[in-house]
Every structure is written in C-alpha cells, then in structure tokens.
C-alpha cells in the first residue's frame, strides 16, 4: 500500500536515538559529542540528524518544521512533484529550498516553485519549494529544511533525534 511504501522508504534506519520528548525550544537535545561518536563507528554507513520545531509563517501561521541533516529516504523519496530527480532536490535544498508535504501544500494552496516565507530570528526569509513529498506522519503537513540552512537563519544547531544505518550484516543491539 501507499503507507507501507512510505514506511519502508522513511524508516530505513537500523537504530534511532531520540532526546526526551517535550523539551521545546529550550531543550538541549542530543549531545553533539555523542552524535559524532556514534556516527563515526565503523559499523555505521550513514547517520542523519533531525530536529522537530514549529516555525511561524506570516502567510500560513504556525507550521511544523523538520530540520534534517540529510534525507533518510535518499533516492527513494516519493515526490508528488519536484524540481528534478532526488539529486536536484538535494542541491536545491543545500541552496536554501525546502520540501513540503502534500497535506501542507493542499491545505494552503502551495505549489512547486512557490516561496514559503518564514519568520526567523534574523528576519523574515523566503524558501523556494523544491519538492512536494508524499508524507504521512502528520495530517497537518510538514516542511523539511536542511540543518545547515536552518542553523544559519535560526542560529540553532540542536538535534533531537539521530538515525543510524548500519553496514549490511551488522545487527543493532540495545
């Protein structure tokens, strides 16, 4: 089914590490040293960080913003529409574009190439929409932004979750 495909593509990690829930904007998140240590383990082939926050859009109100170190779905990301293949979307995001979920796009009439305006501590900024993604984690919809782009605008490099993909043949142990 559609949801099963989405789960397979987005829950690819072998190990998930998360900070305590409910910390909000002032919570310290995961320790950067621990993240670096886990990511550098020889058993790990890929590590991706994430942070869930709420951002304010002058046009849309509050929107859920997922700050990602990289897209865990990679080339398997399921686009409803995009500026090109996954590599082109990654390049656009590195330059400051965002991905939005179909739910958010439909609810607010957003389309590929539109600019999503968000209020940041450094002033209001516009983020071009590089992809509209099929995504089922929230009926409200989500916005996805790369961690470096977010850190530049919000001066916030916190991480509240870490996904690790292990080498083939390596079993995750508690």
Image (cartoon, rainbow, N blue to C red):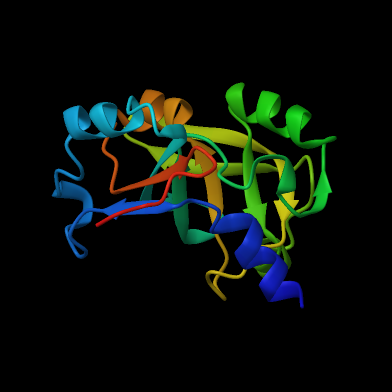
Give the farthest residue toward the front: 169
Tell me residue 68's x, y (percent).
47, 40
Where 123 sits versus 4, above or below? above
Tell me residue 3's x, y (percent).
68, 74
Which quadrant is home to the N terminus? bottom right
Residue ID at (64%, 45%): 99
Tell me residue 66's x, y (percent).
46, 50
Residue 54 visible in the displayed image: no
- 70 to the left or right of 2: left
Which quadrant is home to the C terminus? bottom left
Residue ID at (27%, 54%): 18
- 36 to the left or right of 83: left
Q: Quadrant of residue 134?
A: bottom right
Q: Nearer the viewer, residue 87 or 97?
A: 87
- 16 to the left or right of 136: left
Residue ID at (51%, 44%): 169
Tell me residue 104's x, y (percent).
63, 64
Residue 8 visible in the displayed image: yes
Q: Quadrant of residue 49?
A: top left
């Amino acid at each position: 089914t559609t949801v099963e495909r989405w789960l397979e593509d987005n829950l690819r990690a072998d190990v998930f590490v998360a900070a305590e829930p409910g910390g909000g904007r002032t919570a310290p998140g995961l320790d950067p040293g621990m993240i670096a240590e886990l990511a550098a383990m020889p058993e790990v082939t890929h590590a991706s960080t994430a942070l869930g926050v709420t951002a304010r859009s002058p046009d849309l109100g509050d929107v859920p913003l997922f700050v990602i170190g990289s897209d865990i779905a990679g080339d398997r990301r399921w686009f409803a529409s995009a500026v090109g293949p996954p590599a082109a979307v990654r390049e656009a995001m590195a330059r400051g574009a965002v991905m939005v979920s179909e739910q958010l796009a439909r609810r607010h009439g957003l389309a590929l190439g539109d600019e999503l305006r968000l209020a940041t501590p450094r002033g209001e900024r516009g983020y071009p929409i590089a992809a509209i993604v099929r995504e089922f984690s929230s009926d409200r919809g989500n916005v996805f932004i790369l961690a470096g782009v977010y850190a530049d605008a919000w001066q916030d490099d916190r991480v509240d979750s870490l996904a690790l993909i292990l080498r083939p043949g390596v079993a995750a142990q508690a």
